[in-house]
Image (tube, grey):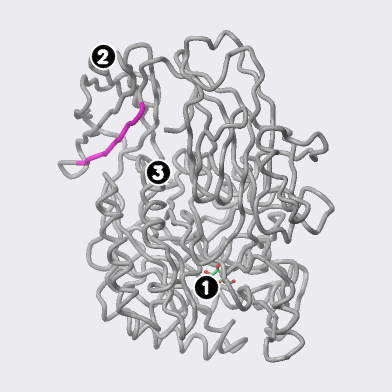
Amino acid sequence: MYPIENKARSILSLDGMWDFKLPEGSEGREDAWIRDFPKDGESLYVPASYNDQREDGRYRSYRGRAYYHRSVTVPSIYEGQRLFLRFDAVAHDAWIYINGELLIAHRGGFLPFEAEITERIRTGTPFSVVVVCDNTIDHSTLPVGNEEGTAFFGSDNAQVPAVAEAKKLRGNVNLPNFDFFNYCGINRHVRIISKPVEFISGLTLVPVLQDGLKSAEIQYRIQVDGKADRGLPEVALSDREGNIVARGTGFEGRLRIDRPRLWEPYPGDPYLYSVTVTYGEDEYTEQTGLRSVRTEGTRLLINDRPFYFKGFGKHEDFYIGGRGVNELLNTKDINLLHWIHANSFRTSHYPYAEEMIRLCDREGIVVIDEAPAVGINGGPSVNPYETYPLKDYHKQVLKEMIERDKNHPCIVMWSLGNEPDTENFPESAYEYWRELYGLAHELDPQDRPVTLVCCQNDYTRDKVTRTMDVVCINRYYGWYNLSGDMKAAALAWNIELDFWEKQGKPVMVTEYGCDAIQGLHGTNGEMFTEEFQAEYYRILDAEFDKRDFLMGEHCWAFADFGTLQGVMRPDGNKKGVFTRERRPKLSAHFLRERWEKIPNFDYK
Ligand code: GCB
């Protein structure tokens, strides 16, 4: 549950300066650091990725375990409370030690974990927290790293003998099989949360709209923790003004609402109610919205009306902090989405910080929530489904993601992953993704639509994409192929769209785009110019408008972002419609004009 403060709970933030150390070589002394952290550690800021905080290339190229330390004292006034240490995200794998003893280990860099420390510490007495985090990416991690060969867009030509030899000798390096920088460390907030001895440990909310949206109920389920029986929980539902509009008692129940105010995407009113649960001494409040979501024919319906997605794939990425949670930047991004008349984004390619999802609830931005499953692709000769040990872990990540985000009204669809191989091994792909599809439906109390984002491939061989609730396609006609030839690109799009039209499914474009270097201009549609990017969208959007079954367009990408260096990536990926510092490129003005004319509902 997201940490909150109220009369029963409080939060001690552990954000700020931590001691930090990267192992020097192969001395193997690091185990001792867990008990006795070296005094010569560097100072680094948390929450943020460690990679760009110091002028040391090793911080960017490092592969392996990194060590953080901090001394903490919980004030004595907390005596008698239960205390939990929560990490919102540590990339990628983490081991947390309290006074030299392992408290908890966690796999995966984008989801929260917490453990009770009440019995491990004494209030009023300093204790040490050591975080060991490992940024290794390989065939067993999500996102996936390559174990041999080159990174995504790498430039190592192994046919040159000297290159092949040098690669063997260079030792362990991280080779991302994905196109964003592998920013690592304690990327999100760290907090100690105090809770009463008996406390509320789970809350599930399912809005059900009835009677042609004229009435509604919220079904709720509550879990508690603690030895003593504190009776039945009480539940109160308040409207935006704070008036209680429904009450309930018990671990499960329904809150009925007459004349409900619905949660609507901006510029509609993203109306939020508050659900407050009391149990013994404890109290927990969560905001929630009333909205329905389902697919029907070639449409995705929000509140029973066909929604048209206008927006982007994004990244959590910024100067210096890397993938560190950045609420100031999130606020700016949401306002840029409003400015450009976008209504949605996908959390490509991992679940974003909880603060961002909460902001989207409030601001009426529709979200496709994506699991960090990117890079499940080994080329024509490697069947990743047989050789990458991922499935159980992938299930675990899905479980954690849906558990974290299940109550948010802004989330209307789950994405199981991005651009896996579905073409070289279509049967294996089908088996793998269909099982996860079933699991996501099972796990989600709101039973939202489920998708898997499919890549530029021979779509006729792909068997699984068409079985998802929504077909999501990433395509780069006019850029990676038919480069610069927008006439041919429009033709290729139409050939492919004819195919998808026949599937009778809702289809949306989750990525299309091209690099544009800020300030580079031309008069003849030259690639990489701002004019080319604007023209690319103008030409392709005109084709999309002719297709009634297409239910959305997400440009790639919202803003320029950092990647591993390589000859295809001059200072990162430049497909942003905004620059990395959030200045609009020419295409932003085109999209703003276009999207102003496209309503959220009934466009198609
Ligand atoms: C894609 C990927 C995205 C890349 C993008 C690109 O298909 O999903 O992660 O950044 O293409 O720019 O090549």
Depth check: give the residue in front, 294 or 371: 371
Query: How far across and down, in percent of the image, does residue 535 sit?
Result: 60, 77
Q: Is residue 230 above or below residue 365?
A: above
**Can the viewer see residue 548 in this picture?**
no
The quadrant of the image that shows the N terminus is top left
| 3D distance between C-alphas at marks 2 and 3 | 29 Å
Q: Which residue is mark 2?
A: 229
Q: Which residue is mark 3?
A: 405
As drawn, 478 above or below 353: below
Task: Specify whether tag 1 is near ligand 1 (CB below 8 Å).
Answer: no
Cα separation, mark 1 vs mark 2, equals 55 Å
Predominant SS of the magenta segment:
strand
Of residues 382 and 451, the one nearer the viewer is 382
What amino acid is labelled 1 in the image? Tyr
Disc 3 marks a residue whose amino acid type is Asp
From the image, tell me which residue sits under label 1: 512
